[in-house]
Amino acid sequence: MSEAFLSIRDLKVHFPTTDGIVKATDGLSYDLEKGKTLGIVGESGSGKSVSSSAIMGLYRGTNAQVSGQIILEGSDLLTLTDSEMRDMRGKDVSMIFQDPLSAMHPYYTVGNQIAEAYKVHNDVSKKAARSRAIEMLDRVGIPQPDRRVDDYPHQFSGGMRQRAMIAMGLINDPKLLIADEPTTALDVTVQAQILDLLQDLQRDFEAAVIIITHDLGVVAEMADDVLVMYAGRAVEYGSNKEIFTQPQMPYTWGLLSSIPDVTGDTDVPLIPIPGNPPSLLNPPKGCAFHPRCPHRDKVPDGRCATELPELLAQGSVPTHLSRCHLTDPDRVYEQEVLPMIAPDRVGES
Amino acid sequence: MFAYAVRRLGIGAVLLLSLTLVTYFLFFAVPSDPAKQACGKNCNEEQIEQTRVALGYDKPWIAQWGDFMTGLVKGRDFPADEELRANNPNIVTHCAAPCMGFSFVNQQTVNEILSGAFPISASIAVVALVFWVTGGVLFGILAAMTKGSFLDRGLVGLTLIAYAFPSFFIGKFLITYVSIKWGWVEYPAYLSIEEGGVSGWLSSLFLPALTLALLFLAGYVRITRSYVLESLSEDYIRTAKAKGLSQRTMIFKHALRAALTPLVTMIGLDFAGLLGGAIITENVFAYNGLGVVALQSFTSDDLPTMVGLVILIGSFVILANIIVDILYAVIDPRVRLG
Ligand SMILES: Nc1ncnc2c1ncn2[C@@H]1O[C@H](COP(=O)(O)OP(=O)(O)OP(=O)(O)O)[C@@H](O)[C@H]1O
Ligand SMILES: [Mg+2]
């Protein structure tokens, strides 16, 4: 693996609660290269937001226990002091959130909030910060930015608010932008515009992007690499092409079969994954997915229920990793899964 | 905003006049004899009747209210009985508009009584307000920032204890210890700004204002603490943190701003209840403010003074409410006045 821009190693984020320890992220590892886009997918509660917030250091000063390594350009963010981390936040690494209405302070103007993000990292006058905010609003496609800069968040539409949040996130030209479900709260046409905008800006700003989403369609379109998370862990990691054409982990198969085929155009019935996401207080022993896995009987000795599989390269591609005991996942996928989700692609690869 | 304020003031004025009407009505609905009070203990029936006529208490209550309204608009001469005035020009008192009446118990116009007492009460109230709001907000933030710690519990607990003690006890305690025994401040006696300058005025207010402030402090600590904590878990605070803002900016600019609305609401409500606290405080410190005037007027059936108090205090409550409503819109841009 080449020298990665961002390298997460064995990241754990545990929340002590009165019921016990919630292991929201439990041994997560992945890499992201400079200027690339990583899509993180997984069901609700799989730890996508928590693991990404940990990169931003948002759990500092809370009772959350964070361990492991978050190496950004060679330095481990978890070893930085609080004030060093504060300097990075919003400057080298920034984050935009799901619901732009609640993510903005209702009592301050959009311009004030964007300018604030610039001013905190740059020793400039109020006026300079304001004109920089106007410039960024213009850049993200807000019409009449010099007038809208003085509007309050409630005077913006949902799409405009998310554009404003993107402007805020990019104002300091960060190396890494984390977008946590940036389009979930928006309607479909606006979603597409925001995603286009993100792609455009990424090219201009040359930032690496982590995009968190439920929507595999978004991932297929935006991501260079894909990380599939389940119960706080990576269960599959690979390039966009590998994940969508040669997925190796039954959970990924489940995700693919529960959405309309993103590469083909057939009308096959959607098959939801049976059961519910596991409790993070008491995750299942062995592979956390085994209680819901339709293929667990193919593994001898019930190992799925007792032994946690390693995240390993299973096939010929060394960077395509998955966490599964199946010895021949490619064959199972070709013969049993593909006919169900995309019959027209059987035998293609 | 201006039109809104003018309209609210108009409604407030109507409300005030209705309040005086109600006061007149209620005063005469209960069995009491203001003429007997004004005449004194040793009056016989005949003298009481004379007093009644002289003071105008013989007229129907609505006519008396009418006279009162005339006084407000045009001014009046006292005593109310014209014949008496004509025969004894030397006892006539002219009371210019807006005349709130003449207190026979005190032999002074109500305007004089109130303008003597008002600055004292207002001084205590304003200084107390500054004490309890700044103290409450600062302690509340401190408690929120150290949530669950010894300091947090200490602050919340101590202010609650101060609240639980009766005001007269705290007042006596402060006079006895802080002033007499330890000599940290001079024995409290009211000094106006003309008499003592700003510093003399302030130091004469220190103990009474503190006593009054302790009555309200606990509530403000709790409100601030809980609203700051609540807003710290809001999404926009997460955004603020993600921008790289310092803890201080996050709390003072973002979290506290969200707590302003409930704080302003509380201040508006407490403003109305301030007189109750002031009565006790002023009595403990023997400051002749509105609290003392109110107490006296009620025990001596002094209707004109009571009505004057209703107008004065009522206008402040109404004004405070208008200001609070305008402040809502200033604080929260989503609020529209109208
Ligand atoms: N501060 C916290 N204290 C306790 N548990 C928490 C805390 N924050 C998150 N969790 C738990 O951690 C788990 C993972 O949360 P996370 O927000 O990362 O999920 P997610 O994958 O982003 O889901 P979604 O798609 O719904 O956003 C959830 O079960 C959540 O309840
Ligand atoms: Mg999430």
Image (cartoon, coloured by chain):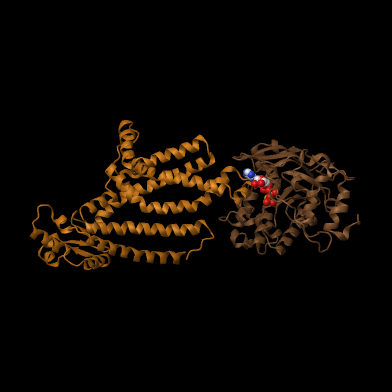
Q: Relative to residue A183, is residue B332 drawn left or right?
A: left
On screen, A313 above or below A159? above
Tag count = 0
On screen, A30 above or below B81? above
Regarding residue A33, the answer to whether it shows in the image is no
Instruction: Pick whichever, A328 or B290, lies toward us.
Output: A328
Which image quarter: residue B325?
bottom left
Instruction: Pick whichever, A31 or A93, lies toward us.
Output: A31
Q: Position of residue B178 (x, y in %)?
A: 34, 34
Instruction: Pick whichever, B120 or A252, lies toward us.
Output: A252
Q: Position of residue B93 (x, y in %)?
A: 18, 60
Q: Label the orange chain with its letter.
A: B
Which image quarter: residue B22?
bottom left
The colour of chain A is: brown
Q: Position of residue B80 (x, y in %)?
A: 17, 64
Q: Relative to residue A202, is residue A16 drawn left or right?
A: left
Q: Position of residue B290 (x, y in %)?
A: 29, 51
